[in-house]
């Protein structure tokens, strides 16, 4: 960065909010994967949308790359600078205000740097629900959730972040401010610019605020852990619950027994709730706007039907908030247990729900043939077709050595995903990590259209370079 540009940024956001020394920049250089790149030229922390726009204009004038950044909880190197060392990291953590709550319209306008948990609490304080929920909700930001179109555990009922957003405020690659903060559920006036920026990972512009949908708070939310013989039985259970529970079915998570063994090994206080072990488990959540008795009766009758028909082998129904929390902790500790066990090759994939049992069977067999004894850690949001399909080395093998096979493992998994009409990224995005795989798995026509959008909105190519395309 030139001294003139650094001085200009300091004049815009204040001396205390521009970091140019490596020690000061260090906290902004890594995401959840913890792999620090070379430091950027500087980190700037604007306080409002106008300051974001001014910084972007200054960067555009000098053709300096801009890397928008939220809570740095991503897994695909999407919010960290590239190796060029020439970028400005634009941290939005100071844009953290809830601007307005419109109870009658059931909307809330928040800035991009708001922590997801704080947004949930603000909605709760207003007597309503913001349903986006994921493991990183205590540190991820709404801007990052929108930039990656985050999913989470309630997509089955409420949809991804895209479905929870009505309007955006965006700073364009030219440093102009587009105010699209309209709380409209119907707006048929041309191209849907909002949806271009959602999921674009900061490569088209900087999301600075959003209008979010709110929902009635459920009177009760109850969970059950259901033991199953196979993923195909899980698919049958999902259909049964959808038929019997309708919109009350909020979550449906699939976990293999190996996943729970990992959790028990590394978090021994989280106990296996069954007397016997079973190949697969489904964590089911129902919510009711009527009463807790209604939710309990619906859960008992539907799970009971699954047991009576032989679809399910056993079940544990939570009868208190503490028991519900305990069941969900089993699910939420799987990634932490994986990390404690050592490095593994991760995949965040999406498939037609109907294809998941066949995908698991076919891909497991292909990987075990190529890498005998490899450990398959399969879990995820079966209700919306999203699997976290992770591959670890055989027990006792070196993790670093196994990672040398990452390209081969990825090709086996992603080719199988493609054969079932799936996606190589369900909710984590592409970032820099999956860029080459995107180029391999997308059609030339689709890639050309994406490049045309990028060229039209960011002709200088300064927005988060090296990500997605």
Image (cartoon, rainbow, N blue to C red):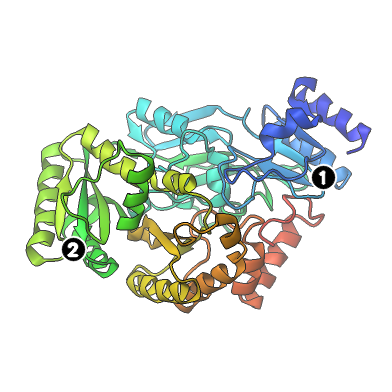
Of the image marks 1 and 2, the number of the one nearer the N terminus: 1
Q: Which quadrant of the figure has residue 459?
A: bottom right
Mark 2 falls on what kind of element? helix
Q: Who's the residue at 71% across and 66% down the image?
A: 451
Q: Residues within 10 Å of mark 2 (few under 14, many from 20)?
A: some
Mark 1 falls on what kind of element? loop
User: Mark 1 highlights which residue?
Assistant: 85
Q: Which quadrant of the figure has residue 233?
A: bottom left
Quarter of the image where the C terminus is located: bottom right
Q: Which quadrant of the figure has residue 38?
A: top right
Image side of residue 297 versus residue 235, left or right: left
Is residue 190 placed above or below 407 in the rendered structure?
above
Q: Residues within 10 Å of mark 1 (few under 14, many from 20)?
A: some
Q: Is residue 84 visible?
A: yes
Which one is in front, 320 or 268?
268
Residue 209: x and y in percent read: 58, 38
Residue located farthest toward the left when viewing the structure as drawn: 308
Image side of residue 426 versus residue 285, left or right: right
Residue 444: x and y in percent read: 66, 77
Circles 1 and 2: CB atoms closer than 8 Å: no
Q: Who's the residue at 57% across and 46% down the image?
A: 74
Label drawn at residue 240: 2
Residue located farthest toward the bottom when viewing the structure as drawn: 419
């Amino acid at each position: 960065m030139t001294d003139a540009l650094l001085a200009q940024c300091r004049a815009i956001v204040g001396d205390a909010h521009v970091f140019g020394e490596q020690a000061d920049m260090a906290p902004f250089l890594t995401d959840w994967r913890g792999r620090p790149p070379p430091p950027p030229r500087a980190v700037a922390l604007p306080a409002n949308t106008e300051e974001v726009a001014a910084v972007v204009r200054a960067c555009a004038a000098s053709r300096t790359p801009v890397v928008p950044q939220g809570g740095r909880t991503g897994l695909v190197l999407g919010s960290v600078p590239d190796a060029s060392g020439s970028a400005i990291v634009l941290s939005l953590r100071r844009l953290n205000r809830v601007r307005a709550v419109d109870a009658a319209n059931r909307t809330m306008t928040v800035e991009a740097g708001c922590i997801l948990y704080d947004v949930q609490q603000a909605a709760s304080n207003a007597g309503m629900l913001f349903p986006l929920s994921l493991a990183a909700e205590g540190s991820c930001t709404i801007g990052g959730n929108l930039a990656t179109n985050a999913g989470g555990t309630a997509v089955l009922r409420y949809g991804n972040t895209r479905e929870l957003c009505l309007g955006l405020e965006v700073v364009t690659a030219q440093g102009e401010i587009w105010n699209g903060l309209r709380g409209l559920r119907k707006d048929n006036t041309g191209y849907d610019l909002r949806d271009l920026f959602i999921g674009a990972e900061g490569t088209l512009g900087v999301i600075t605020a959003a209008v979010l949908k709110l929902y009635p708070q459920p009177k009760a939310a109850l969970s059950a852990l259901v033991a199953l013989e196979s993923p195909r039985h899980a698919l049958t259970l999902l259909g049964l619950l959808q038929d019997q529970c309708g919109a009350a079915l909020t979550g449906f998570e699939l976990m293999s027994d190996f996943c729970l063994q990992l959790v028990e090994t590394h978090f021994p206080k989280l106990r296996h709730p069954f007397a016997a072990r079973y190949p697969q488990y489904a964590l089911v959540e129902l919510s009711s706007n009527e009463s807790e008795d209604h939710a309990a009766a619906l859960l008992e009758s539907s799970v009971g039907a699954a047991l009576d028909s032989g679809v399910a082998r056993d079940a544990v129904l939570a009868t208190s908030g503490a028991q519900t929390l305990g069941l969900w902790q089993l699910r939420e500790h799987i990634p932490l247990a994986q990390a404690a066990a050592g490095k593994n090759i991760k995949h965040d994939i999406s498939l037609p729900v109907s294809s998941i049992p066949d995908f698991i069977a076919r891909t497991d067999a292909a990987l075990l043939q190529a890498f005998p004894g490899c450990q398959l850690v399969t879990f995820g949001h079966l209700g919306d077709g999203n699997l976290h399909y992770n591959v670890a080395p055989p027990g006792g093998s070196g993790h670093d050595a196994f990672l040398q096979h990452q390209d081969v493992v990825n090709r086996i998994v992603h080719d199988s995903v493609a054969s079932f009409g799936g996606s190589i990224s369900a909710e984590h995005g592409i970032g820099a990590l999956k860029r080459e795989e995107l180029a391999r798995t997308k059609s030339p026509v689709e890639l050309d259209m994406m490049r045309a959008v990028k060229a039209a909105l960011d002709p200088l190519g300064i927005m988060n370079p090296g990500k997605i395309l």
